[in-house]
Amino acid sequence: MKPKQSYRIWFSQRNGSTVLCKGLEDTGVAGKPGEFFNVAEDSSLCEKYAVGSFAALRDKIWELGTSPNGVFGIKHSLHAGRYGKIFEELKRLKGIPDDQSPDEEELLGDLFPHCRHIFLTRRNKVRQAVSWWKAIQDNVWHLEAEQEHRNQEDFYEKNYDFAALSHLFKEATLRECAIQEYFSRYHIQPLTLVYEDFIENFKGTIRHIVDYLEIDAGDLRVKDLFYRKTADSDSEAWVQRFREDLQQGMDGRIW
């Protein structure tokens, strides 16, 4: 069934997208936003969903991301290589020659009907990079409210890597720059949400999004946070060490 409304959440890693999407899905009226464009580098959307046409792919993604009231949600980042690969696959499925460069918003128009955009950002990119690198190293990407996790005592000293953190610091920043360029190109004015703010007012943020999407929600009930922060005292030690290392050799101290 074709959704009557859709939205796209634009994010980069470790800025609360999973927390936000779970909160939206739990309302029962704001879609079931997931990372439906996320495929392995050696795979494709058609392989992932076992389909062979644009219509079948579209219907499958709609099925996964649409709540019973006809609201469809998706979340995705903007990584030039991976996003470009997805775009080229959608072009081929629609029969558009390789040498043609159609308008991206026009190409995606029938996949995202009556679409609105939400931009998710995180102010503190140092903390974002630390959270990202920590998750890569210990493979703990999310913790449910009642879950506990503690790494071995020497984990942080053994795994601190300035080069890796610097790469992720730059990647998080550049992904957001790429997203902003996309918004500028297509004159999109998204609803902007800041991780540091919405995590402090989670229920208010969910209600704000439902209002922004103009969803008829009646007596909307928002559940408590399903996930909790993965950061701990050792994460803080990495943050302080990384910010110091970033400023080595600079003429003036910034932070």
Image (spheres, grey):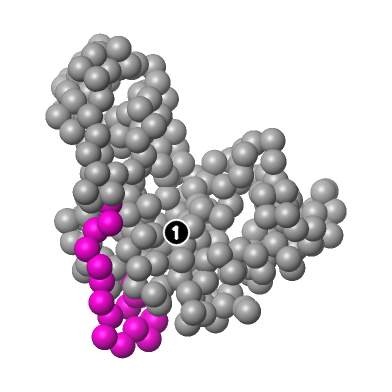
Q: Is residue 163 left or right of residue 94?
A: left
User: Picture quarter containing residue 254?
Assistant: top left
Residue 188, x across and y down, in percent: 48, 64
Give the residues drawn in magenta, as a range.
209-227
Q: Considering the numbered disc 1 on the image, is that residue within a helix, a strand or a loop?
A: strand
Left or right of residue 120, residue 87 in this image: right
| Three-letter code for the amino acid on which mark 1 is drawn | Ile
Q: Position of residue 13 (x, y in %)?
A: 40, 42
**Which residue is denoted by mark 1 in the rendering?**
9
* Up/down of 42 relative to 164, above or below: below
Coordinates of residue 148 in the picture (x, y in percent)? 22, 39
Q: Main secondary structure of the magenta part?
A: loop
Quarter of the figure that contains the C terminus: top left
Between 67 and 166, the one lying in front of the other is 67
Question: Residue at 25% across / 68% down in the picture?
Answer: 223
Question: Residue placed at 35% from the left, 35% from the top?
Answer: 140
